[in-house]
Amino acid sequence: QIPVYYSHLNTGRPYNADKPNKYTSRYFDEANGALYPFGYGLSYTTFTVSDVKLSAPTMKRDGKVTASVQVTNTGKREGATVVQMYLQDVTASMSRPVKQLKGFEKITLKPGETQTVSFPIDIEALKFWNQQMKYDAEPGKFNVFI
């Protein structure tokens, strides 16, 4: 897998400097983080993200939850940014990516302007191909990242 890709599997690699390394290998065990992570977005202004909310703490199979966030242009220039929403399936029956991009929206804000961005989360956003090759969602815990 490409080391700078956002949707890598939770395999224990790459090398983590915080954990003791008592085993050696022929791999080059060195931190390999990206200079600019996926979706970083360079800009001539600055933005802050605040007031991240879920419309409900749980969701029924036929229901929907909305994730919303307020984005403020805290810089001195008008600018555009892409707000991204990722989901993580914590309790899946099989190995799942650490994060999956499930929604994004590009917004343009004037200096000092604030806008609320919302992302709907329904059963379709939680589905994956399981071991029986069935495209389905499993009950469990999910993390939302914005």
Image: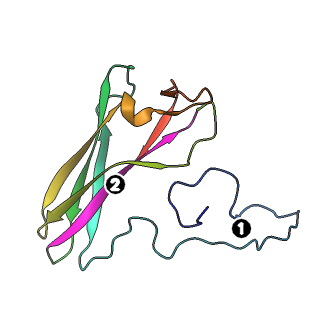
In this view, 100 is above or below 113: above
Which disc is residue 3 wearing? none
Residue 62 in the image, given as x and y percentages of width and height: 34, 19
Kind of residue sitting beneath label 1: Ala
Q: Please report whichever mark, 2 or 1, sits nearer to the chain's N-terminal start.
A: 1
The residue to which callout 1 is attached is 17
Tell me the distance, in whole angstroms, between the alpha carbons under discs 2 and 1: 28 Å
Which disc is residue 84 wearing? 2
In this view, 16 is above or below 122: below
In this view, 62 is above or below 66: above
Q: Mark 2 falls on what kind of element?
A: strand
Left-right relation of 141 to 82: right
Q: Nearer the viewer, residue 123 or 20?
A: 123
What residue is rendered at 53% in x and 27% in y?
A: 134
Region of the chain picked out in magenta, as a range: 78-91
Residue 46 in the image, given as x and y percentages of width and height: 26, 72
What residue is rendered at 81% in x and 62% in y?
A: 20
Neighbour tally class for label 1: few under 14, some 14-19, many 20 plus, Cα within 10 Å: few
